[in-house]
Image (tube, helix red, strand yellow):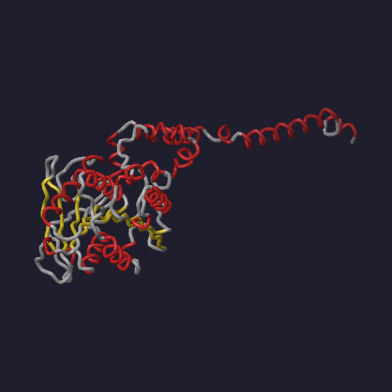
Amino acid sequence: MRQRGIASGKGSPQARGSRGQKKLIAKGDHQYGKDNFFLSCGLPSRLWLLLAVALYVLTPLCISYSSNAQRALTYLNYAAPPFSNLSDISSYLGPDHSGRAFFVNASQSGQIGTWHVYPKGEEVPSLSNGKPVVVYFHGNAGNRGLRHRVGLYKLLANLDYHIIAVDYRGFGDSSAIWPTNETVVSDAFDVYQWVRQQATGPIFTWGHSLGTGVSVQAASRLCAQGTCPQGVVLESAFMSIESAATTHPLGRPWSWILRFYPSIADLFFQQWTEQLNSLATITSVNSPLLLVHSKDDFYISYKESERLASHAQEHRSDRSTVELHLLEGHGHNRIVYAESLPALVQNFVTTRGKPPK
């Protein structure tokens, strides 16, 4: 028995040392793999991981140096319902409301697709009948015929207002161009000037989402000429493209970099041409302001409207001319369905709808 044990080597110190060494090696291999996840992956997994990291780093850099990519992400004008016949306004408004479709000539060449939605109960009213007029500037993507936008026209028509709904060039049935900061603001300015030549009642502008930036920029130009709107409504507003990028779904994968590494954010946004910086411009707008935002907005944080309203109030002698109303449960596109909205709008038009001094 002893000879067999010695021959087999199971009880010898050398055998015990060999088994211990194997255990240490196995333990070491396991620990090495646990602490070095990348090296423990197979070659295909490593390549995919490297590709993901490269895309994560290069995507914002490529966008920052490509004006075409910036415009595509900012305006999303190519994301529109197919086969939209915007000339048939009745198919959008239904039997209870009426209006007409037409074009306004753009000062930069081309045409701007426009709707005039009549106050409810009037078949062919004129803008010169003294009733309030709301010029509506929509957000990115789609056209003036999207459901939530049409819902707002109907709400305002029920309040006995005229609505002028605009598709910037590059949207809807307007002239086909790639929109830029300058073209959308220029189109808004042109349509407002057209309305001003026709209307005898107070004229308001209403911007939603991206349209709030357009509305503020256009109102600033109008005020510089002494023709401020009677009031400016900003629905789901943002301070600038840069500030909105940190909370928008498209920007969230990079939000921590933009927030905690300001130098990288500066490098990214200093090349960004489509700014629509309302925070810097709103101080030159003298019109009464009404800001409405839902706290559960998934795309633009309501804090953007809070800061914008606060900044505007700080630069006014009468802070009451800036109103902020935060709603609950209406997301980004459903504020039009808020029960409190008609009263908010009607009160604003009645109490603030006077030419600013």
Q: List x then y, in percent, for residue 38.
A: 55, 34
Q: Nearer the viewer, residue 337 or 323?
A: 323
Q: Quadrant of residue 235?
A: bottom left
Q: Residue furthest top?
A: 14
Which residue is pictured at 13% across the width and 51% down the height?
A: 194
Q: Quadrant of residue 175?
A: top left
Which residue is pictured at 58% across the width and 36% down the height?
A: 37
Q: Residue furthest right?
A: 2
Number of on-image labels: 0
Residue 228 seen = yes
Q: Nearer the viewer, residue 121 or 228?
A: 228
Position above or below: 28 against 106: above
Q: Nearer the viewer, residue 132 or 175?
A: 132
Residue 299 seen = no
Q: Quadrant of residue 264?
A: top left
Quarter of the picture containing the N terminus is top right
Position of 105 with respect to 357 (left or right) is left
Q: List x then y, in percent, for residue 189.
A: 19, 46
Q: List x then y, in percent, for residue 314.
A: 40, 49
Position above or below: 37 against 215: above
Position above or below: 69 against 85: above
Q: List x then y, in percent, for residue 110.
A: 12, 43
